[in-house]
Image: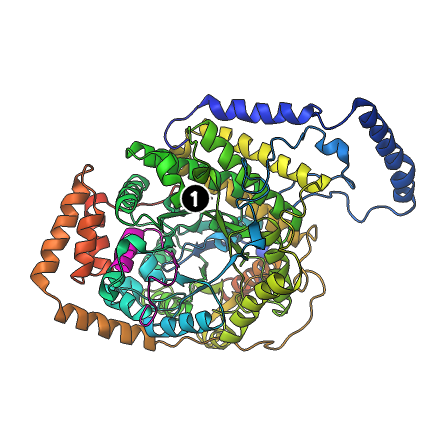
Amino acid sequence: MLRNGGEAYWKTKAKAVVERRAKPGSLYDEAVVESVRKGVRQWEESVFGEQAKKLPESRSDFQTASGIALKPLFTPLDVMDADYSDQGYPGVFPYLRGVHPTMYRGRAWTMRMFSGFGTPEDTNKRLKLLLDHGETGLSIAFDMPTLYGYDCDHDRAHGEVGRCGVSVSSLKDMEVIFDGIPLNKVSTSMTINAPATVLTCMYAGVAKRQGVSMEGLRGTVQADMLKEYIAQKEWVYPPEAHLRLVRDLMVFCTKRMPLWNYISISGYHIREAGSSAVQELAFTLADGFGYVELGMEAGLKPEQFAPRLSFFFNSTMDFFEEIAKFRAARKIWAAVLREKYGVKNPRSLLMRFHTQTSGASLTWQQPLNNIVRTTIEALAAVLGGTQSLHTNSFDEAWALPTEKAVQVALRTQQVIAEETGLPTVIDPLGGSYYVEWLTEQMEEEAYKYFDRIESAGGLLKAIKSGYMQREIAENSYRLSRRVEEGKDNVVGVNKYAIKEKKPIDTLKIDFKAQRSQVKRLERVKRERDGAKVQAALTKIGRAFENEGVNSIEPMLKAVLEYATLGEIVQVGREAFGTWREPLIL
Amino acid sequence: MAKKTVSEQRKIRILVAKPGLDGHDRGALVLARALRDAGMEVIYSGLLPSPEQVVQMALDEDVDVVALSLLNGAHMTAFPRVKKLLEKMGGGDIVVVGGGIIPEDDKSKLLKMGITGLYGPGSSLEEIVGHIQERVRKERWGK
């Protein structure tokens, strides 16, 4: 998948799924099937058909958001192939119905709100507030300079410090963010990719300062560089160089931070960039298989490292399609890991995932309606069996969220968990003709996409040539046109629009963040041992030049000497060069 | 002589650019396609140019319009910087429009600087295209 084009596995697999779906399974007796067939035909012709003649349907093309054509009614005939032996049970291969035997009956999903803005002090305060409100895991957003590996005093950072996440230039900033938050008591997710290795070292550095052992650190770093080239587009180096750093991180963490989830394979950004649910599913899983191969190349056994890979999906407005996507994802992951990569240990076959509701589905118009959208998306994530969830705030099409808006978003999850009874029964939509059919449809389309990626030269080549990027751009244009032409409706946007005068108050971030961050950085540079920093940076450079040397150990040493993020990333720029993406338009 | 209508003029040349550390290119790419479908000659900056590079591209490509998109909160620094640099380097007559996640208070400040449009999520493509054509008609071809 990652490097070799033209692998036959995916073609065979896609064909097998199509063939399986065409054949009746063992659940249905031929006579019963015949009678259902007759009944359905009769209903279609005389009941539904008659009514549709009298009152024509409201539109000519009923379809899912991904463009899968939909009939008015699904019946046993649509899932006849399923003999349910290939579905398994919750906690049992292939985990279609959930990764845990007890699912939410044991414990609700982790409510993890992504937050971070301004200075480390601001973010520290927000994190403590969320912990006080019952949040169970931390999730940090970084500002753009940090995401691109620039210190707050770099020319490119001007005007961007702390604006859409917290600014981190050195270990000192991280010490402030986690001040008073014992790292042995929380799990932390850090949404960082290109400089993920540096931030992991900084987190380990904070633990060291707090006297907490690295071995026990729990959390996740995104580090999913493949999707950066596909969708989020926050890279520094060419793909091969970033993949090498991810590989170093995998090897290092396997030894030294065994509970650290070092890659969060993300469909979220792929979806937000404009992909369909099918593309999100296919590209994300393809990336996942890519990382499995990367780890194997480094000499690790998938058996050993697969439990450290987690996933991150989007949940947006086509309710049933989203649920089907989550269910299909679990099944494909487990099946391919077992079949293609030879993984046997059940723990290593589990697809655990975080979900975030869709930012792109939020409207600027009538922003309070976004609470409803987020609720529906959160329901889909829970019905899809997510392990953790972030719910967006209603004001996020306007600005970063206010505390009040964040509280409503968190309460949305708490209402679902506490008041609806929804967590009681596992995979409650299992067995729905429509949901089961759609789950299989997603599965089939994903395998077909894997085969197309192989035909495009394998994952790495497809990314470098812009294949997925163009597929996504094509779909996002299609979606925009559909709204523009009134084929899809968005309430408050192209339907039920009203004139509004500033409907909500929004969070304001002042420019003080930049000034105070630059000041702290100056102090850090003044107080550190310059010669030790230089020596540490030179060692990182040597590791970068030599494929055989793991670069994380010297990076950790440099971070502890207060070498800055920008300095470390710059060493990489000199060793690896930078990257310009192929033309997408 | 009567003013020519937009369709009688040469094609509008427009640079769609993201002048900052911001990979959110969905809106910019969709807009670029829509502008092209509306008959404009579209140049896309690619990702991560600095304001200086955007201005250089605008001058090199001799565009009528620069359409700026940022969703990273840096619009109050990057948009004015592009506008000022254009003025300084002889591109003061180039129409500058913008869009992204732009809070209301910032909008009025940007409008005062002559950066208009300021479309956010949920804006119609037709409206954006119309606004750009309107400004070009008035400011570039009306003189």
* Residue A484 appears in the picture as rendered: yes
* Residue A170 appears in the picture as rendered: no
Task: Name the residue at 37% across, 52% down.
Answer: A234
Residue A194 x %, y %? 32, 51
Residue furthest left in the image: A531
Does residue A458 sit above or below A327 in this rendering?
above
Give left or right: position of B8 versus A456: right
Does residue B114 sit above or below A297 in this rendering?
below
Give left or right: position of A460 versus A503: left
- In the foreground, B106 or A69: A69
Task: Name the residue at 63% across, 35% down.
Answer: A440
Magenta stretch: residue B110 in it?
no
Q: Quadrant of residue A198?
A: bottom left
Q: Chain of mark 1?
A: A
Give left or right: position of A321 versus A171: right
- In the foreground, B68 or B72: B72
The residue identified by callout 1 is: A230
The kind of residue tagged 1 is Ile
Residue A22 x %, y %? 68, 24
Q: Which residues are magenta?
A: A178-204
